Amino acid sequence: MPQPVAFVIMARYPNVGMVKTRLGRSIGAERACLVYQAFLRDLEDRFGRKSRALIWAFHPPESNFPSLVAAGTRCVPQAGQDLGERMHGCFRLLQAEGFDKVILIGADVPHVQEQWLDEAEAALDGSDVVLGPTDDGGYYLIAMREPHDVFTGVEMSTPRVLAETLAKAAAARLRVHLVPPTFDVDDAGDLARLRELLATGGCEPRLPHTARLLKSWDGKKG
């Protein structure tokens, strides 16, 4: 009997200088790490008690990431040489366990909307692959019922990721559905955009950990 939908958040252990490095070049590595930690807390608060099974897929595998989230929350180490291989591995693992649908996002989209996740889940009834495009040419969400390889040969973290993934899906005759686009927080401009959403009420839920951190920096130098 199929298990509930698996909702996977790909995350790194928040070591200073090892997360959000592009953002760190603008605001400093320590602040970038604090931002990332706030994202993790907000995501856990949002999704830790939902009907979908929340699973954190963490990197590096030897880190003590499980200590950062609530006791009992499932955490699995990412396995693979690059991000594409590690994502593919998550799909293979969870679908082998019997999950009927797997939805995967990154930890740098704490503002992901519930309705986009609902749309992705529903779309899998008639599609093989669901993608959530980002403004920089990548994607913030990928969902599948089967572990199709739309990863091998796709160079991650480039403006070509979405286009190359769509091309691989088309070559394999896979049906693709796109959910609404958004941005992931990679640099200072993205963080300013998120700050604006929080300040104007354009982001629901409110992401209290992130909002509190950003507000604490208002008027401070450095």
Image: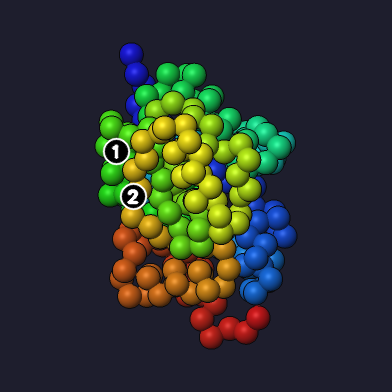
Residue 120 x, y percent position in the rendering: 33, 42
- Dot 1 corresponds to which residue? 123
Q: Residue at point 53% right, 32% down?
A: 149
Q: Tag 2: Cα neighbours inside 10 Å, few (<14), some, or many (≥20)?
A: some
Q: Nearer the viewer, residue 46 or 160?
A: 160
Task: Report how many numbered discs are placed on residues in the image.
Answer: 2
Q: Is residue 212 left or right of residue 1?
A: right
Picture layout, residue 112 above or below residue 21: above
Specify which label sits upstream in the sequence, 1 or 2: 1
Which of the 4 image quarters holds residue 76? Answer: top right
Residue 71 x, y percent position in the rendering: 51, 35
Q: Is residue 65 left or right of residue 133?
A: right
Kindly indicate whether the residue at mark 2 contacts the one at mark 1 (C-beta within 8 angstroms).
yes
Per the image, label 2 sits on a secondary structure element best described as: loop
Per the image, label 1 sits on a secondary structure element best described as: helix
Mark 2 residue type? Val
Q: Residue at point 31% right, 60% down?
A: 204
- Dot 2 corresponds to which residue? 179
Q: Is residue 60 left or right of residue 192?
A: right
Picture layout, residue 159 above or below residue 119: below
Picture layout, residue 19 above or below residue 126: below
